[in-house]
Structure formats: C-alpha cells, structure tokens
Image (spheres, rainbow, N blue to C red):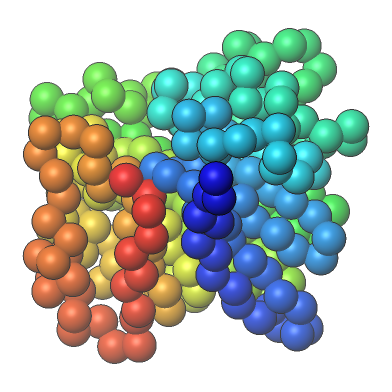
C-alpha cells in the first residue's frame, strides 16, 4: 500500500537558499532549511508514520493543548542535539533539561535563525479561558535568512500581533470559538499585510471556518496570496 506524501511549499531566502514547509495537519508542520529540520507543534496523530520522519534539529511548541503538543511525539522526533523552545507550561510537562522555556517578548537563536516570541491569547468576552493571557502561550516570529515568518499560536488579535510589519509568510488560526473569527483574521491580515497567508486550526469543530468568506474579506489586500493546505 502506498501513502500520499504530505504537501510541501518552498520559498527562496535572501541568500538564495531554499526553505520548505511540510504540512501535516492543524498547526503541526515542519520547516526544512539549510540541512536542518524544525517541527512546529508535534502531535503524533497528525504526523502519521512518525518513525519514518527525519529527526528534529529543533522544535517550536507554543502551548500545551493536546492538539498542539504530545510528549510521545516530542520524544519520538527529538534528535540527539535537538533544541526545544516552548512556553513555560509545556516545559513543565517535558523531562528536565529537554526544553528552554520562553515567555512572550523573549528572543532566542536556533543557529543563525532569529526567534522572537509574541503573546497568544483570547480577548473576547466568554473566550478568555480557552487561551488566557496570564498563562503565557506563545506565537513565533522567525527570521530565516531574511524571510520573516509569523506563526501566531492560538488566540485572537493582540496589540503585538497587529503591530507586526514586513511579514513574508503568516500562519493564523481561524477556528470558532477557540481562536479567530473570519473577521478577526481579516483585521490582522489588513494590518500586517503578509505576502502569503496560511489559515490553520480551521476545522475539527462543529462550526467550520468559512474559508471562502475569509478569501472575500481579504481579497483587497494587494500582493497577498492565501494558500489552503491540510491544516484543519
């Protein structure tokens, strides 16, 4: 029996190197750059045959919810010299010494990759318990050889998010009631104006995100491409 390969998208960085995203599901994806593999939000159920996947040189984990982090997946993917950057709650769930705990506003390095953390939380009435600001869940701003990539984590628009500029690729969660509405995502995209936008966290609940509405709401953003990948 053959299995379909996970979809990939590739981009060229400032110095002409190739960066490739491999999409699994939800916010679980891999970034390959310059011989290194970074996993974002490793979840075994989304990764498929995890034993056949390349080991991680690094991992980014924004918060501890079951659809974003599994200890078993981290253990299976963790390479010999793997660097794990994560929020404080996730770090407390992993064996001592495995991870570096970060808080919103921190900076870190993965070799020559610059990492800045941003807060990820809900702000609408009735939603704040999903991802409370006080917990310190994270979004990620990566500068990979001049390519600026924003992975928002889970939550709704924040002042720090809306203040971002010069974003090449943006990943935003668009899933009700846990993350952004279509209108909130449109607000963010009009503010930060990325070249490419990927929605994630857009399914797996009763109220499915209206991707066509989202496309219409953002169709006036000049130069932005919205790409749909299997990131429900």
The residue that appears at 52% across and 30% down in the rendered structure is 43
Where is the N terminus found, in terms of image quarters? top right
**Residue 164 in the figure: left or right of residue 185:** right
Q: Which residue lies furthest to the bottom in this view?
A: 222
In x, y percent, where is residue 177? 16, 34
**Residue 156 in the figure: left or right of residue 38:** left
As rendered, which of 143 and 65 lies closer to the eye? 65
Give the quarter of the image for residue 218: bottom left
Rendered position, 98 above or below 219: above
In x, y percent, where is residue 217? 13, 71
Whether residue 138 is visible, yes or no, is no
Whether residue 65 is visible, yes or no, is yes
As rendered, which of 149 and 229 lies closer to the eye? 229
Give the quarter of the image for residue 92: top right
Rendered position, 111 above or below 54: below
Where is the C terminus found, in terms of image quarters? top left
In x, y percent, where is residue 131? 33, 27
Q: Residue furthest front?
A: 1
**Residue 227 in the figure: left or right of residue 217:** right
Tally the numbered discs: 0
The residue that appears at 55% across and 38% down in the rendered structure is 47
The residue that appears at 81% across and 65% down in the rendered structure is 34
In x, y percent, where is residue 48? 54, 36
The residue that appears at 25% across and 20% down in the rendered structure is 129
As rendered, which of 213 and 3 lies closer to the eye? 3
Give the quarter of the image for residue 126: top left
């Amino acid at each position: 029996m053959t299995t379909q390969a996970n979809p990939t998208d590739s981009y060229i960085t400032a110095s002409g190197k190739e960066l490739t995203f491999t999409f699994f599901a939800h916010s679980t994806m891999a970034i390959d750059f310059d011989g290194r593999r970074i996993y974002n939000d490793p979840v075994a159920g989304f990764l498929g045959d995890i034993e056949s996947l390349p080991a991680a040189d690094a991992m980014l984990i924004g918060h501890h919810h079951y659809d974003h982090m599994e200890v078993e997946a981290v253990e299976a993917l963790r390479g010999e010299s793997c660097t794990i950057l994560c929020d404080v709650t996730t770090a407390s769930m992993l064996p001592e010494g495995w991870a570096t705990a970060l808080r919103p506003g921190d900076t870190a390095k993965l070799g020559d990759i610059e990492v800045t953390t941003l807060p990820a939380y809900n702000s609408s009435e009735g939603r704040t318990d999903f991802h409370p600001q006080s917990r310190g869940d994270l979004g990620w701003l990566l500068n990979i050889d001049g390519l600026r990539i924003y992975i928002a984590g889970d939550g709704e628009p924040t002042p720090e998010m809306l203040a971002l500029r010069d974003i090449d690729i943006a990943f935003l969660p668009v899933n009700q009631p846990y993350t952004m509405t279509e209108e909130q995502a449109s607000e963010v995209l009009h503010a930060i104006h990325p070249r490419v936008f990927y929605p994630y966290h857009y399914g797996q609940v009763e109220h499915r995100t209206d991707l066509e509405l989202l496309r219409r709401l953002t169709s006036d953003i000049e130069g932005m491409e919205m790409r749909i990948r299997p990131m429900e």
